[in-house]
Amino acid sequence: MNWEALGAIGEMVAAGGVIFSLVYLAVQIRNQSKESRLGAINALTAVYISGMDARYSTEEDDYDE
């Protein structure tokens, strides 16, 4: 093998590494987007539940009297 062949093999390995890292990055960004969306839904649900809990707990107190 000469130096040109070794250089070509090195470039192919480097190109494969770049492609692999781009695919890995895309998967990580997709997962992060899903987690962010689910976190926002969870936060909204918690706020809604606490609001409903506060609303109905005060109404129950009115009926107890």
Image (tube, rainbow, N blue to C red):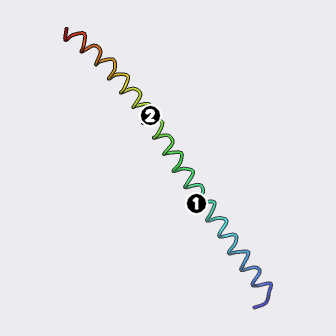
| Kind of residue sitting beneath label 2 | Ala
**Which residue in the structure is indicated by mark 2?**
43
Per the model, the C-alpha gap separating discs 1 and 2 is: 29 Å
Considering only order in the chain, which callout, 2 or 1, is on the residue closer to the N terminus?
A: 1
Q: Nearer the viewer, mark 1 or mark 2?
A: 2
The residue sitting at the front extreme is 65
In the image, 24: left or right of 42? right
| Crowdedness near tag 1: few (<14), some (14–19) or many (≥20) residues, C-alpha within 10 Å | few
How many C-alpha atoms fall within 10 Å of the one at disc 2: few (<14), some, or many (≥20)? few
**SS at badge 1:** helix
Q: Is residue 30 left or right of residue 16?
A: left
Q: Nearer the viewer, residue 42 or 23?
A: 42
Residue at the spot x=59%, y=54% of the render?
26
The quadrant of the picture occupied by the C terminus is top left
Counting labels gives 2
Quadrant of the image containing the N terminus: bottom right
Which residue in the structure is indicated by mark 1? 24
Residue 44, picture quadrant: top left
Position in image of residue 41 (x %, y %): 44, 35
